[in-house]
Image (cartoon, grey):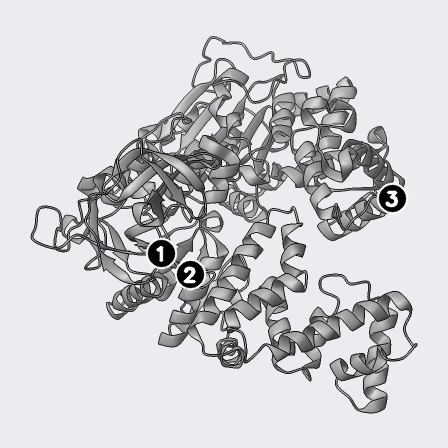
């Protein structure tokens, strides 16, 4: 694999293969030392191989934290270094605290002197000592994300950049990606060019950095960037830290970005004793700058490195491990390892990974919640179970089903569905249209998205409402008929009020799902998130689509609003035993007895946007995410997919995820609800409920998009390779492969797509 970044011109690489040093250090350590007890051979090797660069490939559940803490204890106990000569880097404060506590339990007070913390915390510590070198004072301020965006917006406005067309938040994302790669403004080349802000992104980056220095401030990206500047321009300062840090340990190395790698490589140049622990199969954060190439090319970056594989898993059952290993083996960009059970399991109690196909989303939620209740009745705690979704919009149906059945739950890593910002905003529009007297709803969305209504205009509406004893909406309608407001806010408020009244007039005339979509579009709210370039924006748009879909289950907007009000009354008790709902990204590093993995369908998981934007690299990261999901489970896994999803009030047939075919058959129990197609891809005839393949059972039904009726059609397609066809969404194309009733078509304008033959017609 080619190196994704070539840094040799900037940072000399003195690492050369060296003769192995004696395993015994300055002081012999007894073989029964506390940190050396109960280890398998690979763990022992990772702990005692102290000299030279070491990469510990630590699979899921293989005890990497134990290895890291024991390695630190071993280095200090053998007197290879003093505590302050050890640098241990983590990604979260929680991980840093846990490591310090564990090392402290092994070696006592000396653990407090170790340089142990996150990249940002350690960089701050260094930068405070040498701030003047990079133009700061030692008491510099670290700006949070809101302050960063506000400052950048000021810079953009001073340069007459239209911040509505080019939001500061989007430009900040570009700048932070540059910083993640260690790129100062002067290091940017044509290859890094961005069309953001009319092609002036690099110029604005320069001005933003100048403004930060004027304010004696820096953002989080600067902490590493200034450290790199410090080391590369001040060799005496670099030498000081190179001398000091005789041993460097890094956790979660697969999540490092380019700037972090450069920082580590600089510090490790003298002693070369750097030990990085990570798992290339769990690199799932490319969207926030993580560079999987760091771990894949460790041996190239650090010649003479020793690679030690931790493959004994102490978490999951053999079936789960085999399923996860079989799946991830389909990735080409990996160093390779195979997990094996590190514990003895009761063979009679071991369940295979179950894969269940259901008819639609609501049935999927019922199936999962019924399984949760069954497990709970056997005496297992709800807290030992988790539903892991690929995207936030998937949580709604599970939340509502859990509420309906009275099963307590918590959403980790984000608010519950109806508590999300975009859902609250959209609900406020519906509340105001349904009841114009709703003052709280009026306040929330009268200037969302921005309509040019300043604080003075809003205060005048409030004053009029109080003086006339009117609702805020009626006060606004009255106010726009006067000359109290300036022309611009008056016009904006007039348009807003007219829109609300026009939407209200449609309540009984237009289907409420269509009306909701109309409101979101005409208000500019959908466009606001479409123009937002932050990583969260696509997820917010997906949540809005799910909100519109949710309205299908109710007869009216009012009925839906009443339902949500009752849902929101679901009391939150942090001490209660609860099922956990979270995204797969958020679940990394956690473990549960029972894991439920819904939505394994093409376009949902693997996610279509990830594949469209990342190509094969995006697909491989999606597969790593599936591997993460499977390996969170200790005892059981239930994977589900739905044959149909309702999107924008239309049923769409869904193809099972390609990942389902990659699960090895010997370790999977497949089960499809009666009448469904058998599954995805080439192995689609292997479902165990009745075994429709080779039996007298009728072929599976599909949904005809044109009639919205369930019909039965032959499994064999009426199309052949080379046929010209038309698809309502993708246009004209040529059939290039036929698999039963599934076609692969090379569309003239949309590229290759896999579709059901019921969605195309011959031309």
Label 2 CA crowd tier, 10 Å (few <14, some 14–19, many 20+): few
- Residue 759 as seen in the image, left or right of residue 172: left
Reading the image, the residue beneath label 1 is: 705
User: Who comes first in sequence, dot 1 or dot 2?
Assistant: 2
The disc label shown at residue 160, or none: 3
* Front in this rendered view, residue 87 or 393: 393
Helix, strand or loop status at disc 3: loop
Reading the image, the residue beneath label 2 is: 650
Residue at image location 68% in from the left, 60% down from the top: 524
> Is residue 249 shown to the viewer in this render?
yes
Q: Count the marks.
A: 3
Distance from disc 2 to disc 3, alpha carbons, whole Å, reads: 44 Å
Helix, strand or loop status at disc 1: loop
Q: Eyeballing the image, is 467 above or below 687?
A: below
Residue at image location 35% in from the left, 49% down from the top: 759
The C terminus sits in image quarter: top left
């Amino acid at each position: 694999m080619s190196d994704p970044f070539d840094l040799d011109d900037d940072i000399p690489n003195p690492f050369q293969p060296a003769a192995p040093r004696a395993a015994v250090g300055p002081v012999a350590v007894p073989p029964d030392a506390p940190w050396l007890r109960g280890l398998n051979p690979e763990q022992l090797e990772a702990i005692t191989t102290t000299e030279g660069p070491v990469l510990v490939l630590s699979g899921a559940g293989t005890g990497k934290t134990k290895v890291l803490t024991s390695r630190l204890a071993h280095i200090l106990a053998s007197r290879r270094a003093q505590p302050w000569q050890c640098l241990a880097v983590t990604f979260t404060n929680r991980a840093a605290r846990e490591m310090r506590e564990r090392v402290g339990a092994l070696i006592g007070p000396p653990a407090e002197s170790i340089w142990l913390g996150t990249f940002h915390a350690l960089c701050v510590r260094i930068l405070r000592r040498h701030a003047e070198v990079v133009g700061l004072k030692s008491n510099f301020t670290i700006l949070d994300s809101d302050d960063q965006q506000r400052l950048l917006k000021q810079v953009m406005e001073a340069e007459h950049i239209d911040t509505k067309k080019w939001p500061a938040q989007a430009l900040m994302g570009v700048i932070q990606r540059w910083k993640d790669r260690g790129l100062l403004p002067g290091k940017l080349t044509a290859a890094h060019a961005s069309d953001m802000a009319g092609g002036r992104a690099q110029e604005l980056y320069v001005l933003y950095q100048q403004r930060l220095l004027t304010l004696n401030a820096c953002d989080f990206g600067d902490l590493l960037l200034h450290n790199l500047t410090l080391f590369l321009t001040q060799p005496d300062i670099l030498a000081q830290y190179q001398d000091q840090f005789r041993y460097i340990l890094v956790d979660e190395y697969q999540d490092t970005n380019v700037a972090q790698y450069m920082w580590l490589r600089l510090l490790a140049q003298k002693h070369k004793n750097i030990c990085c622990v990570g798992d290339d199969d769990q690199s799932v954060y490319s969207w926030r700058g993580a560079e999987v190439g760091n771990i894949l090319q460790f041996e190239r970056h650090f010649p003479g490195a020793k690679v030690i594989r931790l493959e004994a898993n102490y978490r999951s059952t053999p079936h789960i491990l085999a399923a996860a290993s079989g799946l991830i083996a389909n990735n080409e960009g990996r160093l390779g390892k195979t997990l094996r059970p590190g514990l003895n399991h009761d063979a009679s109690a071991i369940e295979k990974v179950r894969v269940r196909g259901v008819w639609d989303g609501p049935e999927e939620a019922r199936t999962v919640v019924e399984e949760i209740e069954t497990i709970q009745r056997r005496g297992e705690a709800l807290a030992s179970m988790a539903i892991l979704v690929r995207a936030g919009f998937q949580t709604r149906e599970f939340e509502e089903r859990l509420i309906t059945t009275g099963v307590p739950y918590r959403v980790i890593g984000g608010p519950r569905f109806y508590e999300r910002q975009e859902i609250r905003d959209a609900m406020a529009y519906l509340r105001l249209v349904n009841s114009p007297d709703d003052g709280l709803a009026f306040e929330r969305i009268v200037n969302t998205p921005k309509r040019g209504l300043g604080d003075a205009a809003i205060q005048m509406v409030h004053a009029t409402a109080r003086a006339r004893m009117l609702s805020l909406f009626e006060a606004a309608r009255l106010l726009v008929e006067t000359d109290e407001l300036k022309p611009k806010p008056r016009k904006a408020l007039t348009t807003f009020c007219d829109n609300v009244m026009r939407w209200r007039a449609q309540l009984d005339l237009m289907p409420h799902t269509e009306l909701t979509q109309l409101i979101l579009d005409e208000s500019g709210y959908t466009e606001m998130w479409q123009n937002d370039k932050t990583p969260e924006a696509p997820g917010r748009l997906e949540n809005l689509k799910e909100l519109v879909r949710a309205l299908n289950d109710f007869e009216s907007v009012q009925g839906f609003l009443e339902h949500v009000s009752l849902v929101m009354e679901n009391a939150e008790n942090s001490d209660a035993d609860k099922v956990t709902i979270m995204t797969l990204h958020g679940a990394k590093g956690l473990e549960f007895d029972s894991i439920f993995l819904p939505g394994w369908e093409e376009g949902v998981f693997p996610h279509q946007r990830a594949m469209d934007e990342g190509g094969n690299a995006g697909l491989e990261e999606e597969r790593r995410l599936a591997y993460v999901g499977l390996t969170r489970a200790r005892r059981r896994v239930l994977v589900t997919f739905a044959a149909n999803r309702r999107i924008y009030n239309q049923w769409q047939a869904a193809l099972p995820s390609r990942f389902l075919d990659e699960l090895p058959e010997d370790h999977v129990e497949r089960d499809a609800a009666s009448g469904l197609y058998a599954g995805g891809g080439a192995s689609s005839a292997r479902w165990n409920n009745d075994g429709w393949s080779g039996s007298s059972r009728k072929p599976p039904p599909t949904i005809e998009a044109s009639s919205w009726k369930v019909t039965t059609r032959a499994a064999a397609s009426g199309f052949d390779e080379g046929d010209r066809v038309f698809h309502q969404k993708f246009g004209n194309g040529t059939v290039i492969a036929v698999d039963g009733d599934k076609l692969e078509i090379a569309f003239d304008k949309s590229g290759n797509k896999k579709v059901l033959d019921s969605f195309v017609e011959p031309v």
